[in-house]
Image (cartoon, rainbow, N blue to C red):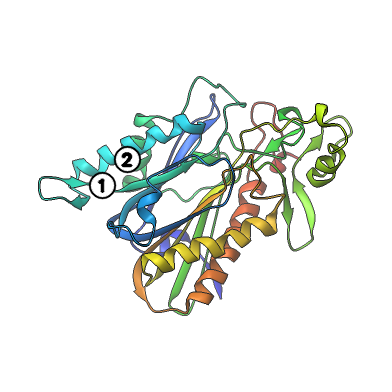
């Protein structure tokens, strides 16, 4: 197994657009020829678009774009901009009288950092799609959907640290698989190689981690001090050249959540909307167990990369600044 660049997985292009001052942005993964796709939503507070059509028994068998966006539910508007971009290029599901681009995606909550009045919108989605086609951006940290991402929020935003966008890809034989993740979780981010917290709920005065799981246990006897800060969510996408059916893509998305569980503690809470998509564009025959195992592995490393590349923004400290 060797590390590769995401750009080596043919058929996909990635673009971002963001507003650094407002601390928000979006990321789009395009597959203009159409990708088999699946999704698994594990968190209790998701914000998603067109995920029902990815269920195995439904008609549409390919998507043309997946987006990851900040802005909470407002950020779902970026999907319309991506659709417009694809429509102008006659890309979409043929319904005889028109071609309808199939665009699905998920959002995270970043309204507590930067400006809550500026959110990813139709124009930002359109520009991100343009960047995907013209530039094909493979960058990490405070970019795209990771721009306003934060982590470790069980004691509220005053104890949070900066999250970010992370990527990682590997190749085994002819099989290529990669991940793009916007890390914006309620809990701490753990490096599984050392089992140590690398970002999370943080005491800025004492300069030490407070451990989200311990803080949650401490709140059991004093519910009045509970601050659930209901706006979190880690969202990501697996891309691969493995030949998958829609049902298999859904399974890969499900297995990929192991990467979240290994790196975020706690994960999949009632105040997270943790969602992972899987996109397949290729004809490489591969054991589904291996594809799912690798999906979890690349998600895991992408999460760590997203946090380690995050820079301090709007007084929220990032790992790279410590």
Asked if residue 300 can be seen in this view, the reply is no
Does residue 21 sit above or below 127 in this rendering? above
Q: Position of residue 91 (x, y in %)?
A: 21, 49
Rounded to the nearest whole Å, what is the CA distance between mark 1 and mark 2? Answer: 9 Å
Kind of element beneath mark 2? helix
Q: Which residue in the protein does label 2 denote?
A: 82
The circle drawn on residue 273 is: none
Does residue 260 sit above or below 318 in this rendering? below
Residue lying at 32% horizontally and 36% vertically, measured from the top left: 80
Q: Is residue 127 left or right of residue 194?
A: left
Q: Quadrant of the N terminus?
A: bottom right
Residue lying at 53% horizontally and 76% vertically, measured from the top left: 290
The circle drawn on residue 101 is: 1
Label 2: how many residues lie within 10 Å, few (<14), some (14-19) or many (20+)? Answer: many
Within the image, what quadrant is residue 185 found in? top right
Residue lying at 36% horizontally and 38% vertically, measured from the top left: 79
């Amino acid at each position: 197994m060797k590390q590769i660049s995401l750009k080596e997985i043919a058929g996909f292009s990635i673009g971002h657009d963001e507003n650094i001052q407002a601390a928000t942005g979006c990321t789009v993964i395009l597959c203009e020829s159409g990708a088999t796709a699946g999704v698994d939503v594990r968190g209790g507070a998701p914000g998603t678009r067109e995920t029902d059509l990815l269920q195995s028994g439904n008609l549409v068998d390919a998507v043309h774009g997946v987006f990851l966006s900040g802005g909470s539910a407002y950020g779902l508007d970026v999907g319309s901009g991506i659709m417009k971009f694809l429509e102008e290029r006659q890309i979409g599901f043929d319904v005889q009288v028109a071609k309808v681009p199939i665009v699905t995606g998920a959002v995270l909550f970043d309204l507590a950092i930067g400006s809550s009045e500026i959110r990813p919108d139709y124009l930002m989605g359109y520009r991100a799609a343009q960047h995907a086609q013209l530039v094909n951006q493979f960058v990490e940290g405070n970019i795209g959907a990771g721009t306003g991402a934060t982590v470790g929020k069980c004691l509220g935003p005053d104890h949070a640290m900066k999250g970010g966008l992370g990527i990682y890809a590997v190749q085994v034989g002819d099989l290529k698989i990669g991940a793009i993740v916007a890390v914006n979780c309620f809990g701490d981010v753990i490096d599984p190689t050392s089992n140590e917290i690398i970002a999370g709920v943080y005491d800025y005065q004492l300069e030490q981690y407070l451990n989200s799981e311990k803080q949650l246990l401490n709140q059991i006897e004093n519910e009045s001090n509970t601050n659930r800060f209901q706006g979190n969510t880690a969202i990501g996408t697996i891309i691969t050249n493995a030949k998958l059916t829609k049902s298999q893509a859904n399974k890969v998305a499900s297995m990929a959540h192991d990467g979240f569980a290994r790196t975020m503690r706690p994960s999949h809470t009632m105040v997270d909307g943790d969602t992972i998509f899987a996109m397949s564009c290729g004809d490489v025959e591969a054991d589904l167990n291996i594809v799912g195992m690798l999906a979890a592995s690349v998600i895991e490393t992408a999460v760590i990369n997203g946090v380690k590349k995050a820079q301090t923004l709007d007084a929220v400290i990032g790992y790279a600044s410590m």
